[in-house]
Each structure stands twice: as C-alpha cells, then as structure tokens.
Image (spheres, rainbow, N blue to C red):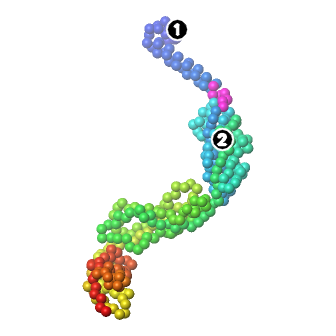
Amino acid sequence: MDLHYFNKNSTNPLAKNQKVKLFIIFFLISFLFWGVTKFSKNYSALVLFDVKYINVPRLLILQPKYKIIEGYVNTSGFQLFYYRFFRKTLEVDFSVSELKNSEGLISLISLRRSLDDQITGSFLSFENEKLFFNYSLHVTKKVPVIIDNKSKFNIASGFSLINDPLIEPDSIHVSGPKSKLDKLNFIPILINTNEEISVNIESEVFLKNDDPFVRYTPDKVTYKQSIKKFTEQSFDVFLKVINIPDSQKIKLFPKKVKLFSSFPVEFVNNVKNDDFELIFDYLDTNDGNFQSVPIRLNKSPNFSKNVRWEPKSISYLIKK
C-alpha cells in the first residue's frame, strides 16, 4: 500500500491518520533543525555564577558580602541554556585583593582573563565589578561545655540523679574569627530523656554549631550521669545555737526537730543524726524582738536530697 493509494482514498480513516503522522514527523524534524541552527548562534545574556575564593591565607577567615558573580556573557545558545539550569562555580584569586581595616575587595575587571578561561565564551561586563568581603584573623580558644538549663530528665519513680554530671572533655577548642570568639564563653548541650530512666546515663552528644565560620574540636562530647535508687528516712536533730552573747542564755521550744531526707539505699545504715546540723542563730532574733526564728540547715551529706524539717521556725525564751 503506497501514498498514491491513500490520496485516492482520502475518505479512508487509515489514510487520514497516516497523513497526520507524516505531518508531525516533518514538523518535528524541521523544528529540530531550526533549534540547532538557532542555539548554535552566539548570544549575550546575564548569567549568575557561584564564587569560590582560592589562595586565602590560613590565618584569615573570609565573610563574603557577595556570594555570586553577575556577568553578561557572550556564548552559544546551548551554553547559555546550560548555565541557566546548572550554575557554574568560578574560582576567584584572593591574592589580588585590596585589604584595609578588616574589609577587602577584589576587582573582577583585573581577573577577566582568568574568569574567561573558566567558561565557554567570554565576559562582556559585570553587574557588580567588585566583590566586597570582611575578613578577620583566625584564632583559637578553649571553651567549657555545660548542661543547658532547659534539659529535662524523665527519672523513674524512686530514683534520682546523684552528684554532678560528668562531661568528657569538659571543654573544647573553638577556632574562628576573634570577633565571634570574644562573645563565646561556654557551649551548652541539651539533654532530654523521653523514656523513664533507672540506670546510669552515658551518651555521646554532638555539639550544635550553626556558624560556618566557627569550628569545634572535637565536635562531640560524652555525657555521664549517675542514677541511684533513693529512699527516705527521718532523723531527730538537736538544734545548735550560735552567736549568743555570753551574758544571756536561751531556751528553745522545741530543742530538736524532725528532719526528713532522701539518699541512695546503700547509705541507709551509714547516715546518722549527727550528719545533719540545724542552727538557731541569735542574730535572727533582732535582740529578742522577734517571737520566732527560722531554722537553717548548716550541714548535710552531699548525697542527700530533698532535706526538709518540721517545724520550720521555733520560739525561744531569753534568760539574762
């Protein structure tokens, strides 16, 4: 079956479909040749390029104000199409920069030949002919790592933290611009536990750093925290009177109070009444003008928690 047959049988649906297909094929071929011819020609257009600074001294830190080069480029249509969808990075030589008072600039005009060598085509002009940046000396200092006060611990009932947490290392070396490091006095770490904890904690914590110009060494620490099962016990503690004049005597009501304290279960048989000291300070009476005086805790075991006593204040009688 040939094309002559289809022309004679124009009412045949198959012949009509064949004509449409041939038309589309010829159209696509024509469009392809037109596109190749069109895009093969040279055009001038504004193109954006990323910037990478090279030959920067190790002791300097750059903070660019411009991170792109906007230039009018003369090149083929194909290349312009490529640059629009795949941005190229151009290397800019820092050694030609002009520096003054922590500020610097680089003239793109002086680097035109170097920039032309990095692209297909050539630069005609630049939207901004100079790249401006700030710079500072690279310094290093030691900064302590601390627990963020927003940290939350979900400790199981009957258990409690004991002693201060241990952070290893307790401080790290921080490198960066002096202006930034002068404001950095400590690095906080946030510890949050969702599940109930009844055993010692030991975990690796990465230090959060959102500043690309500041570097932490190391960038992580180990957090350790002891957790013990606690119990509560009561004690009868006699009050100790202090700062009383030699010419006076004081009688307290009562002489001893009931004290409650929580501590690890392994210390139950080791904690005694004498391990706690509650004081009555005569100076708190304002020479006898106050009828009652608050009791203050002066001594307790360092592992004890939730220390409280009843009554909180007592009455007294002064004998001269």
Give the residue number, with chain letter if any, for mark 1.
Answer: 4
For disc 2, the marked residue is 128
- Earlier sequence position, callout 1 versus callout 2: 1
Q: Please determine whether, in this image, residue 189 is positioned above or below residue 110.
A: below
Q: Position of residue 177 (x, y in %)?
A: 61, 59
Residue 51 seen in this snapshot: yes
Q: Nearer the viewer, residue 306 or 53?
A: 306
Q: Quadrant of the C terminus?
A: bottom left
Q: CA distance from mark 1 to mark 2?
A: 65 Å
Q: Is residue 235 left or right of residue 91?
A: left
Which secondary structure, mark 1?
A: helix
Quarter location, residue 156: bottom left
Q: Residue at x 46, y 15 (%)?
A: 17
Camera-side residue: 112 or 150?
150
Dot 2: within a 10 Å radius of its alpha carbon, few (fewer than 14), some, or many (20 or more) residues?
A: some
Magenta range: 38-44
Q: Can residue 40 be found in the magenta stretch?
A: yes
x and y, in percent, of residue 74 in the image: 68, 33
Q: What's the residue at 37%, 90% (across, down)?
A: 245
Name the residue at 42% across, 64% down. 149
**Position of 158 relative to 237 (above/below):** above
In the figure, is residue 90 to the left or right of 269?
A: right
Vertical position of residue 299 compared to residue 110: above or below: below
What's the residue type where badge 1 is placed? His
| Residue appearing at x 58%, y 63% in the figure | 182
Residue 158 sits in quarter: bottom left
